[in-house]
Amino acid sequence: MPETREDPEPLPDLPSLGEGDETEAEGDFSDLLRSFEGDDGLDDSESDELDAGVELEEDDPTLTDDVELPLDVGEIVLARDEDDGASSDEVGPTGESVGLFDDATALEVDMDDSEGTVEPEDLISEELPALVQEDDQEGTLNEESDELVGMGEEEPPRRAELPWLELPSVGLPESRVVRSRKGLVAVGGSGVALVTPEGDVKTMSETLGDAVTGLLVDADARSVLAGTERGKLYRLVGEDGVPDELTGFRDTLALDREKALSLSLGGPTPSSRPAALLHVTAGGGVLLESTDRGVTWRKVDLGGRVLAVSSGVPPVCLVEQQDGLRLFRSEASGAFRRLAELSADEHTELASEGDVVVLLEPGLGVRVSADGGVTFRRVNGSARATAVTAGRLGGRASAFMALFDAASGHTSLVWIDAASADAHIVSELTPDPELEDELDEWAKVVSIAWDADDETLWAAGLFGARRWRRPPSA
């Protein structure tokens, strides 16, 4: 070990420590000091290569497996900024760049020095709906998740500037279906009645032995085809005539005469020889047509299971094929044209008139098309719709729907612009105070029809049959 270096001059005294400063125990540290041979010309650049004989401990403590490393937020933020600068090609679903916290529904924060906070009323206390995934789909939302995408508590349509006028009651009892064709209105309940524009009621049959659920009006012959809840089909002509039961469709499908099944009437078709359409649930769902007012029927093969047929001209059908659900539209040639694939519920209800097609998916809402069913728009605030119809109002492609609010028992009658899907409440049906406690769904509309000749909207339900007319200045 080299000898200790003796300095020619003594070291200066160190300043005294302040109060509270702790000192190490006094002692002689001269034996720890050493000199280096050839120390002339040494500087800081060479200090790292010299062995002073003293080992200094690092300030950081030794870390063990059970000790968590501190998180350096600055490095993460810096890395985030560098990543954002490097990626400029990715855009969001609307074609705009989307940041980590970008959200169309984000809270607005004042630009001040205070930290942003979220008030308790801004938080969602309800449980979030669960997401489900089907085996053959990338991702599907269940019905409860409608609230997540803004469909659960929708804003209702706006009110029209001028409400429509409710015309005097026609005095009919509980009704299940209403249809209109060329100014002739038919209403079905336990029986069938025709109503003139003046409100006069012409009874065609007091009762058919079962609730009437489907009607097809033949205005030229002033006759009506009527289907019942248990699958009976009748033809009625004139007032108080004897109903003619039609069984030809059962012969076509080799069905027992008394077998209960569900029927839906549609059409007529726009061909030179108009045909009535009949949707029968037997066999998974088939479509029949008749050109002799229901006496004989033949099967229409659309390449799949028929789920629904619309009232109106031209009629459209919803068909389940191997590649998905499709709409088929009746053409003047007598054939059906296959439209684009459609995503819809199996229980979808249809209405059509001209180029207007309306789809009602119970509990989900209403979609409208102004181009014959090629494209559709969803009607905002339509999740509570119970009935739809199509037509033209003053030359405008239009649709109508009834919205039922179970909490209040009220129904809103709504006009829809088929081209834009804009909707306006034109009138309301309010429960009878004397019946509200006994019949919570007294004002619920189960069927509506539009009489374009008289510009009158008809509705059927427990209340019977009601009608509203657009005011002259509307």
Image: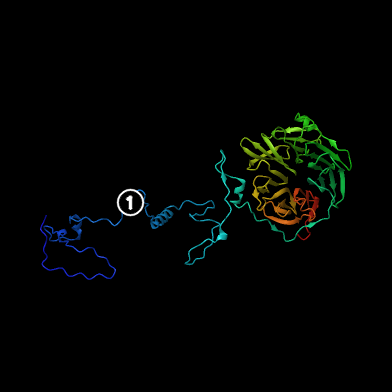
Question: Is 327 displayed left or right of 11 in the figure?
Answer: right
- For this rendering, which residue is in front, 414 or 154? 154
Q: Is residue 55 above or below residue 226?
A: below
Q: Which x, y percent locates residue 284?
A: 69, 34
In front here: 39 or 66? 66
Residue 325 vs 8, above or below: the answer is above
Furthest residue in direction front, as rendered: 25
Identify the residue at image location x=63%, y=51%. Answer: 152
- Label 1 crowd (10 A; few <14 / some 14-19 / many >=20): few
Residue 399 at least partly seen: no
Identify the residue position indicated by label 1 in the image. Answer: 63
Amino acid type, label 1: Leu
Judge whether residue 363 can be spotted in this image. yes
x 89%, y 42%: residue: 240
Task: Pick whichever, 204 or 126, lies toward us.
Answer: 126
Instruction: Please report the residue visible at 65 percent of the width from the left and 42 percent of the height from the top.
Output: 345
x, y (%) of residue 104? 55, 56
Q: Position of residue 334 (x, y in %)?
A: 73, 37
> Is label 1 in a helix, a strand or a loop?
loop
- Determine the image quadrant of residue 20: bottom left
Q: Position of residue 283 (x, y in %)?
A: 71, 32
Q: For the N terminus, which image quadrant? A: bottom left
